């Protein structure tokens, strides 16, 4: 042994020498798997779905489109009025004060209309887009309340949250810009039309520079977008690494990794700097191009227009109007190309949103579903239940048992035996494939889920608390529970004392998921919550985590109180709980293998007695090897 | 987080609160400090500023050239010698216009690019400083500050500071050039017309500044309300089983609607605020333009000015409209940089409570003896409530010390004192006679390892997680550590073995697997003192026994301290300390303590249920 040890150390030393030339086995942050950011610019199905959300506001859409067109019209009109004023009121030779006054009056009228139209359009569109955003989010959230738990089990919360936030926001952006796009397209065509109308030849010549910008932007857009995406990505990588350092700071300091991490982070931060500089170059390179083209267009107007004025083929006012139009000329092109990206992003988001909205709802109330009366007897019965998350691999195979009113039954069995699934079926989290689950004598599929939930209280293995006060957490869905009831329940489960020692007693705000309480304390609060719910039936999954012996004793006592006068179905891990039950059901590989009181099962000498005789304080402490041996023994008998 | 830390978590979390309440004077100091930071890139700053000045000048030339061109056209139209000259001049004006436009574009590009580059460079420097600071700040700081607040500082506040140079300073130069010189040119050409043309500016500048600041305030408020909304959604989805179990969907929808409605109302209010502002600004601008047209037109008729002059005025106005509106953005940038900056610098300027003493020497391990001498401890700010009082014990190489006691007795705190996560407030801790506060932190943390109760998993491979403290370690060592921690077989069963990514974005491990990983990770460090801080609570008793057996060799060369509430974890210790209320109330071996019939015995009886075999034998069976 000692020899080996020395040899190992020697080998290690050789390794270390070689290792110094190797890069370290270390990273900071994780590279995010980005979701597809851009979709096709236009997807009929998705647009139709989005329209479904916009429909209730369609009058507003029509109003705002009308307003945006009027707004664009007034913008086009202003240079024309100036032109009129110059040519008919001011220009030497044509001086006419009344024409000037008329122009001024018309100008005033135009800008009032402009003001009104822009006000209406922006307010209506802005509020409509916000409404649609909140509607979509509500629809998704509401849908997620109903979809089957197997979908929720498979899907990360973070992923759903990014749907509910990021994707929904890009829909809002899309709605706002689509109305603006209408205005931009109108402005673009309007300018082209007015210029050609004012003077066809000069218009055509001036407009000839426009395609240059189009072509340049077509080449520029995909490259620039890559650069922008890269910047976006390195940014989230660097931020991810920072977040990791914040959350893992205790582990980092205790393993003295600061130096290595700093070097690694520097690489990421530097990459971020580089991609941002590159993105900035791409963004800025368009500026001189647009300016040069504007200058070129103005030069054309002056040279060609000027000579036309000299030849008396053009009024000087028209030339001035042209100069005004040229200066506005590139704005719509610029914003339209940006809106194209917004559209593509919206389609990708829309696809993800509809994916969530289209998840099928498996468990639904029947149209004639009955309300489970609080006066029902409180019995639970499984009749030949077959169930599996994947129908080809049933987790429960032909399970039948009955829990009589007021009785406490402990479900025991090794991991994967189907205990948790059986518990979920009582609550109709899933529907059985065959057989029936009856509560109070009714098939759970014939009852409303709401009334079933009110009569079956559930305590989960991991206590889950919500942000809010202790009081709100205990009362939870039983909103008519009084303060006295809450306090009484807390006293009954032994939570009152520690709640009172919190800074604000029952009004203490709990941190995220009750982070400022210990596991045992959270457990007790979840017991109080179940007690306040005052249901006829209690389904409880005992915690497996090791809680200190002091709290644990309190939990055991609370459990007894909780089960008083109720039908109890307990997934039990601790021997004390198991022995306290009226009856024990032993599950193995989805089947009931033994059933009876503790004494009966011990006398039977089956799996239960074998497990019990191994003498572990909890069935979960049994090492796999011994468990394996017991199971084999059971199957042989 | 250990049960001991719960007390401290209840304390107010906002030690950064004082920074947020920064006054005006402090805000100004912050802006100066950001400005000084930008000066570390003098060339880029110089290019940005010079380009800005040139670009603004060129832009101001354009209306002049346009007006000139219109006048030249008219003169040429009049014919004659002057006309012919004007025709040539017209050509030159056109070329000048093209040249000036192009140059202006190029300088604007330089201005924007270099202004942004300066921002990105200081952002890079601040990022590194922030990261380093956060890594170094001691546990007591991280206990009190919400991680979300630190993330906000490191991400959003940093952005606010980054944007200051381009959207604040450079824009200020540009705007004052354009507006100042523009106003001068206009007024010097024609006082009445100039004043008319500028009449919209004060109104718009004021409106846009006020509105921007209000939009910012409401934006912050909206973020607040939206974060309430996302919390409602996140908790609902995370606790969906509870929601379904209590049939609380309707209640949850109500919560959602309440949060959603409050955010929507504010969002609507913001739309109104924004729109009223932009519409009013546009209207006042056009109104001024109409007045210029009317009054200027009359002047042209009266022969006081030319049509070209009038065109100059009108074009000037279009050029000035944008910068005047941007005054609001500039004011906003100043406000944002000053609040964001004071928060960010507030963090960077924090004193690190636990650091090397000026004369700190590397720790020298000879015998490997750990000694607590009358150690007392209280959390900062709670000195009147000491967590530990007069703790003394000694542990030699190869010895195991067990520490047990009710929740909140100070066990975990004791563990945190040895690697100096916190400093003792009384007495001293020594390793081979050296006071821990007099040796370098790096050498101390190499010598002392704590296996935490809730092991943090980094989102990377299992291999990298195990080798976290020794990234150059050889594969063989990683596997050996993993074998000792009884993790190896589980890892081999994973699809990618040791290359499987775990953590937040990877495969999630159970509590027991995480604790086993933490043990393997600590074994990689080869410390002189190893502390198990309730780090086997989620591991079943039998596996724990196997880990103990496998690490027996490892334990021979070091001091082992085991903190646990499961007595089978520590009953073989050479010495067991029973701690209550921060004091050692009983000490001795398992047998001695049982014979004593005190608190340890009471706890033992509590754990061994009547009618069952004693736990000891259970342990042996594994």
Image (tube, rainbow, N blue to C red):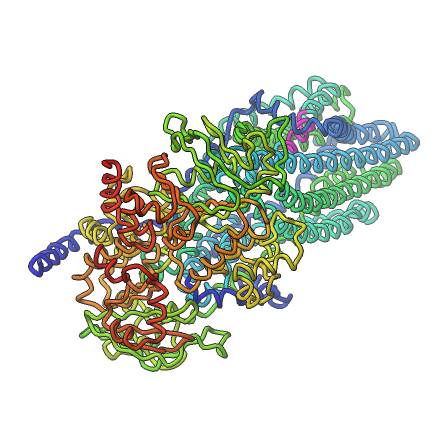
Quadrant of image for the N terminus of chain A = bottom left
- Image location (x, y in percent) of residue B72: 73, 32
| Extreme residue toward the top, this view | A200
Q: Position of residue B130 (x, y in %)?
A: 45, 59
Q: Is residue A484 magenta?
A: no
| B574, A406: nearer the viewer | A406
Q: Quadrant of residue B292?
A: top right
Identify the residue shown where x is 19% and y is 52%: B480
Relative to A600, A443 lies left or right:
right
Boundaries of the magenta span: A175-185
User: Which of these two is toward me, A90 or A56?
Assistant: A56
- Residue closest to the far right: A98
Q: Position of residue A91 (x, y in %)?
A: 83, 30
Q: In the rendered view, does B69 fall on the left or right side of B136?
A: right
Residue A181 painted magenta: yes
Position of residue B62 relative to residue A5, above or below, is: above
Quick check: can you spot residue B404?
yes
Q: Residue furthest left?
A: A3
Q: Main secondary structure of the magenta part?
A: helix
Q: Position of residue B29 (x, y in %)?
A: 58, 66
**Relative to the observer, which residue lies in front, A401 or B473?**
A401
Residue B368 versus residue A287 in the image, above or below: below
């Amino acid at each position: 042994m000692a020899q080996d040890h020395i040899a190992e150390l020697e080998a290690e030393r050789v390794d270390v020498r070689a290792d110094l030339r190797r890069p370290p086995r270390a990273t900071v942050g994780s590279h995010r798997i980005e979701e597809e950011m851009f979709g096709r610019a236009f997807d009929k199905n998705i647009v139709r779905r989005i329209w479904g959300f916009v429909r209730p506001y369609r009058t507003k859409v029509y109003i705002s489109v009308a307003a945006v067109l009027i707004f664009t019209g007034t913008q086009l009109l202003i240079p024309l009025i100036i032109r009129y004023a110059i040519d008919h009121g001011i220009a030497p030779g044509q001086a006419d004060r009344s024409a000037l006054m008329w122009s001024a009056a018309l100008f005033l009228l135009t800008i009032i209309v402009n003001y009104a139209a822009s006000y209406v359009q922006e307010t209506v569109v802005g509020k409509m887009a916000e409404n649609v955003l909140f509607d979509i989010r509500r629809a998704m959230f509401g849908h997620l309340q109903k979809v089957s738990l197997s979908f929720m089990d498979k899907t990360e919360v973070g992923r759903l949250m990014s749907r509910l936030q990021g994707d929904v926001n890009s829909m809002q952006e899309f709605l706002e810009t689509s109305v603006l796009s209408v205005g931009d397209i109108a402005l673009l065509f309007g300018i082209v039309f007015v210029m050609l109308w004012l003077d066809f030849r000069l218009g055509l010549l001036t407009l000839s520079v426009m395609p240059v910008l189009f072509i340049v932007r077509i080449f520029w857009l995909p490259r620039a977008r890559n650069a922008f995406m890269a910047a976006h990505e390195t940014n989230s990588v660097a931020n991810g690494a920072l977040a990791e350092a914040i959350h893992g700071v205790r582990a980092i300091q205790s393993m003295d990794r600061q130096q290595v991490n700093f070097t690694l982070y520097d690489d990421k931060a530097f990459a971020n700097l580089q991609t941002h500089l590159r993105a900035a170059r791409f963004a800025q390179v368009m500026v001189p191009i647009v300016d040069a083209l504007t200058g070129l267009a103005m030069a054309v107007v002056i040279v060609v227009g000027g000579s036309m004025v000299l030849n008396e083929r053009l009024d000087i006012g028209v030339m001035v109007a042209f100069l005004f139009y040229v200066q506005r000329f590139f704005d719509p092109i610029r914003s339209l190309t940006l809106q194209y990206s917004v559209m593509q992003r919206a389609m990708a988001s829309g696809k993800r949103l509809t994916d969530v909205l289209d998840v099928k709802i498996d468990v639904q109330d029947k149209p004639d579903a009955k309300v489970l009366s609080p006066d029902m007897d409180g019995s639970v019965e499984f009749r030949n239940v077959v169930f599996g998350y994947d129908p080809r691999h049933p987790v429960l195979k032909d399970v039948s048992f009955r829990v009589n009113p007021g009785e406490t039954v402990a479900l025991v069995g090794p991991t994967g035996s189907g205990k948790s699934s059986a518990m979920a079926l009582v609550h109709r989290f899933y529907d059985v494939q065959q057989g029936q689950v009856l509560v109070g004598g009714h098939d759970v599929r014939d009852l409303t889920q709401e009334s079933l939930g009110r009569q079956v209280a559930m305590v989960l293995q991991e206590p889950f608390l919500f942000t809010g006060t202790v009081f709100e957490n205990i009362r939870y869905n039983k909103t008519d529970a009084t303060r006295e009831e809450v306090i009484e329940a807390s006293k009954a489960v032994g939570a009152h004392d520690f709640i009172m020692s919190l800074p604000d007693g029952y009004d203490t705000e709990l941190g995220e998921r009750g982070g400022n309480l210990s596991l045992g304390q959270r457990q007790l609060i979840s017991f109080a919550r179940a007690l306040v719910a005052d249901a006829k039936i209690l389904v409880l999954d005992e915690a497996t985590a090791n809680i200190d012996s002091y709290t644990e004793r309190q939990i055991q006592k609370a459990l007894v109180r909780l089960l008083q006068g109720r039908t109890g179905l307990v997934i039990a891990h601790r021997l004390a709980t198991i022995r306290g039950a009226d009856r024990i059901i032993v599950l193995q590989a989805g089947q009931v293998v033994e059933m009876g009181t503790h004494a009966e099962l011990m006398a039977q000498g089956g799996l239960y007695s074998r497990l019990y005789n191994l003498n572990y304080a909890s069935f979960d402490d049994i090492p796999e090897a011994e468990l394996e041996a017991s199971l084999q023994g059971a199957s042989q008998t | 987080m250990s049960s001991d830390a719960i007390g401290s978590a209840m304390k107010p979390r906002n030690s950064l609160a004082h920074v947020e309440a920064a006054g005006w004077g402090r805000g100004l100091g912050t802006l100066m400090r950001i400005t000084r930071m930008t000066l570390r890139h003098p060339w880029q700053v110089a290019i940005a500023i010079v380009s800005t000045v040139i670009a603004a000048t060129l832009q101001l030339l354009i209306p002049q050239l346009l007006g000139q061109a219109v006048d030249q056209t008219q003169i040429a139209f009049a014919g004659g010698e002057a006309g012919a000259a004007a025709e040539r001049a017209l050509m030159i004006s056109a070329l000048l216009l093209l040249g000036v436009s192009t140059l202006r574009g190029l300088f604007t590009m330089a201005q924007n690019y270099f202004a942004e580059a300066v921002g990105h460079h200081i952002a890079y420097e601040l990022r590194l400083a922030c990261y380093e600071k956060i890594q170094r700040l001691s546990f007591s700081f991280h206990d009190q500050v919400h991680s979300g607040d630190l993330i906000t500082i490191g991400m959003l506040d940093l952005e606010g500071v980054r944007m200051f140079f381009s959207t604040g300073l450079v824009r200020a130069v540009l705007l004052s050039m354009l507006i100042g010189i523009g106003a001068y040119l206009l007024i010097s050409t024609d006082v009445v017309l100039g004043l008319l043309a500028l009449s919209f500016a004060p109104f718009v500048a004021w409106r846009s500044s006020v509105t921007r600041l209000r939009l910012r305030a409401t934006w912050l408020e909206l973020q607040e309300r939206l974060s309430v909304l996302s919390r409602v959604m996140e908790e609902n989805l995370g606790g969906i089983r509870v929601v379904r179990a209590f049939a609380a969907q309707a209640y949850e929808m109500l919560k959602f609607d309440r949060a959603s409605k409050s955010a929507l109302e504010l969002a609507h209010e913001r739309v109104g605020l924004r729109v009223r502002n932009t519409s009013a600004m546009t209207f006042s601008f056009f109104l001024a333009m109409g007045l210029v047209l009317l009054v200027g037109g009359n002047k042209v008729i009266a022969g006081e000015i030319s049509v070209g002059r009038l065109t100059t005025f009108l074009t000037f106005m279009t050029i000035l409209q944008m910068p005047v509106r941007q005054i609001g953005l500039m004011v906003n940038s100043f406000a944002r940089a000053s609040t964001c900056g004071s928060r960010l610098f507030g963090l960077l300027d924090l004193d690190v409570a636990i650091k090397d003493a000026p004369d700190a020497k590397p720790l020298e391990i000879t015998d490997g003896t750990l000694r607590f001498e009358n150690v007392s401890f209280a959390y900062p700010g709670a000195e009147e409530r000491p967590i530990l009082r007069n703790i003394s014990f000694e542990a030699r190489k190869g010895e195991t010390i067990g520490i047990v006691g009710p929740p909140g007795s100070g066990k975990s705190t004791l563990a945190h004192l040895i690697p100096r996560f916190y400093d003792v407030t009384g007495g001293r801790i020594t390793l081979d006679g050296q006071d821990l506060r007099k040796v370098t932190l790096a050498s101390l943390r190499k010598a002392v390892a704590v296996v935490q109760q809730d092991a943090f998993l980094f989102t990377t491979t299992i291999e990298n997680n195990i080798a976290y403290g020794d990234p150059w370690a050889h594969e063989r060592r990683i596997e050996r550590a993993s074998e000792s921690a009884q993790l190896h077989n589980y890892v081999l069963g994973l699809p990618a073995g040791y290359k499987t990514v775990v953590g937040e974005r990877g495969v999630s491990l159970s509590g027991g697997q995480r604790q086993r990983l933490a043990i393997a990770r600590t074994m990689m460090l080869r410390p002189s003192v190893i502390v198990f801080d309730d780090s086997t609570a989620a591991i079943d008793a039998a596996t724990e026994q196997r880990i103990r057996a496998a690490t027996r060799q490892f334990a021979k060369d070091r001091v082992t301290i085991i903190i646990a509430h499961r007595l089978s974890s520590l009953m073989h210790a050479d010495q067991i300390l029973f701690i209550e209320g921060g004091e050692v109330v009983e000490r001795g071996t398992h047998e001695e303590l049982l014979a004593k019939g005190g608190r340890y015995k009471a706890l033992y009886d509590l754990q061994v249920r009547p009618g069952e075999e004693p736990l000891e034998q259970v342990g042996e069976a594994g």
